Image (tube, grey):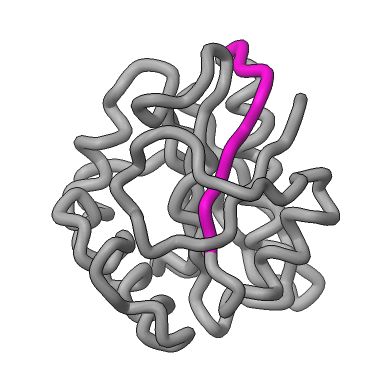
């Protein structure tokens, strides 16, 4: 993929959307854990305790995967990716780790990250996108539903995030 995109917001601040790199690992891990603490879902069986959260640039070197970063004035304010999670049906990838900082919310940044990830999944040839979430992340769940994701009654694949209890699927 390798592209960098700039997006001028109404307030004049430029948001840069780019792929993850090794230098992002620590800042991104802290952002993810801060959001999980904020919504009180900082528990075992989530990305909060997943050791790969500290090395996401390595995780997303896997073929058919990508992780998008939203950056403003040199600071990471969000991220989202597509990953071929083990155990998913053929042609299905997972929308993973969509998090935005409190200051970034309500500005369309999460939606843009989700859309870039969905577009990447289509470019990779996936036909379905699965995700896992929590009821506590109700704004995100509503955004997923608006994008066409439908709730499932049970999880798919083997993400290892057994604490998640909202499962959704998008048919592309």
Against 153, residue 84 (above or below) is: above
Specify the quadrant of the image occupied by residue 145: bottom right
**Which of 11 and 21 lies nearest the eye of the viewer?**
21
Against 135, residue 28 (above or below) is: above
Q: Tell me the chief SS of the magenta region.
A: strand
Q: How many marks?
A: 0
Against 103, residue 74 (above or below) is: above
Q: Which residues are magenta?
A: 125-133
Q: Residue at x 37, y 64 (%)?
A: 163
Against 97, residue 73 (above or below) is: below
Instruction: Give x and y (percent) for residue 124.
Output: 56, 15
Can residue 29 be seen at all in this image of the molecule?
Answer: no
Specify the quadrant of the image occupied by residue 65: top left
Left/right placement of residue 38 relative to residue 129 reads left
**Which of 123 and 164 lies nearest the eye of the viewer?**
164
Query: Is residue 128 inside the magenta stretch?
Result: yes
Can residue 94 be seen at all in this image of the molecule?
Answer: yes
Instruction: Give x and y (percent) for residue 103.
Output: 56, 83
Q: Residue at x 28, y 75 (%)?
A: 43
Left/right placement of residue 113 relative to residue 96 reads right
């Amino acid at each position: 993929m390798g592209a960098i995109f700039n997006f001028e917001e109404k307030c004049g601040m430029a948001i840069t959307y780019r792929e993850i790199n090794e230098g992002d690992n620590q800042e991104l891990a802290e952002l993810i854990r801060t959001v999980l603490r904020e919504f009180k879902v900082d528990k075992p069986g989530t990305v909060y305790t997943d050791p790969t959260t500290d090395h996401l640039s390595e995780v997303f070197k896997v073929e058919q995967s990508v992780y998008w970063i939203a950056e403003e004035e040199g600071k990471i304010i969000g991220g989202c990716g597509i990953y071929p999670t083990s155990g998913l049906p053929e042609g299905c990838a997972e929308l993973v780790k969509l998090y935005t900082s409190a200051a970034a919310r309500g500005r369309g940044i999460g939606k843009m990250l989700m859309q870039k990830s969905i577009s990447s999944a289509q470019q990779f040839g996936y036909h379905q996108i699965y995700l896992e979430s929590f009821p506590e992340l109700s704004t995100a769940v509503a955004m997923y539903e608006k994008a066409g994701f439908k709730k499932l009654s049970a999880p798919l694949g083997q993400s290892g995030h057994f604490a998640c209890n909202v499962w959704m699927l998008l048919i592309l």
